[in-house]
Amino acid sequence: MTQHPSALPPEITVFERGWLSSNNILFVGERSGSALVDTGYYTHGEQTLALLRSALNGRPLDRILNTHLHSDHCGGNAALQQAWPQAQTAIPPGQAAHVRDWDPYALSYTPTGQECPQFRCDTLLEPGTELLLGDRPWQVHAAPGHDPHSVVLFEPQDRILISADALWENGFGVVFPELEGEDAFAEVAATLDLIERLAPRTVIPGHGPVFHDAPRALAVARKRLDGFASNPGKHALYAAKVLLKYKLLEWQRISVSDLRAWTDATPYFGAMHQRHFGDRSQAEWLEGLMEELVRTGAALREDDWLVNL
């Protein structure tokens, strides 16, 4: 975990997390109170609490905001709500009913084979509105593509963008609607166009370090997007490897038989296999995915075990 206080206003602290948990952005203001944007994965809940308690130095957490509801961005919500029951939680519109009725399938946790403890939402992050964070007005912008309900936050004075998974320094997040058979690459392109119009000087991404060369990042993202749009199977292969590596980050090591049982029980894997890789059995496809993770240095094969690297 890395903290990024430099090159940012003093009211902002970024906790750069490993890839299992999204980055957390803490704001502290005299008038607007304290707020945390995104809360990481649930298995890092104790670490998230420790980081916040140290940074808040005795003051309470007043607000929790989620850029979107993937498990690595909101998995710490429940732990923070338990620690600070008065904290108000704001989520993007579109999934409030699923949170209220707690539907882990509709919220993507069951289809991706991930976990997220139940949490409540109190209000919405409506695109087109502003909110005070660190005593400054931040704009809320819709940013569909990676997730249809995602938002990004922009501070126009210093031109700081909280980009979530819409833009990283070297790409963007898996386009999950595409895995469900929906056309969403055009939405990714539109969100990249939005970011270009905002012209941020500083970008706080959902994963990876804070960066300052948005034009370069946008060029990298568009090149990757063009490759995916021209060959959706390439995107599906990338997505399968990401989901597999992500779960391996949680497990650290797993037997191949247990891994096969998990992929068999995870709907996204079955859907991707059937839609793009039906020329081989799911077991053969999984073997190929494991070999690819080993080849690229993301995992190690020890007899009948797959080990995270």
Image (cartoon, helix red, strand yellow):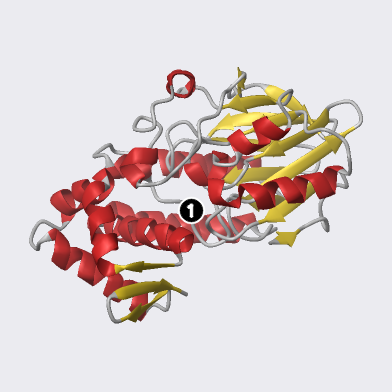
What is the crowding at mark 1: few (fewer than 14 residues within 10 Å), some, or many (at least 20)?
many
Q: On screen, 99 above or below 231?
A: above
Q: Secondary structure at mark 1?
A: loop
Q: Position of residue 303 (x, y in %)?
A: 29, 81
Residue name at image x 66 percent, y 31 percent? 82
Counting the numbered discs, the total is 1
Q: Position of residue 278 (x, y in %)?
A: 10, 56
Amino acid type shown at disc 1: Phe
Residue 203 seen: no
Q: Quadrant of the N terminus?
A: bottom right
The residue at the point 48 percent across, 39 percent down is 116
Task: Give above or below for 21 relative to 63.
Answer: below
Residue lying at 55% horizontally and 46% vertically, measured from the top left? 42
Return the residue found at the far right.
30
Q: Is residue 246 visible?
A: yes
Residue 158, image quadrant: top right
In depth, the one of 183 and 25 nearer the eye is 25
Residue nearer the viewer, 79 or 91: 79
Q: Residue 279 location, x and y as percent?
A: 7, 61
Which residue is the extreme one toward the left?
A: 279
Please give the residue where the numbered disc 1 appears in the rendered image: 172
Residue 71 position within the rendered picture, expressed as x and y whole percent measured from the top left? 49, 42
Q: Nearer the viewer, residue 238 or 137?
A: 238
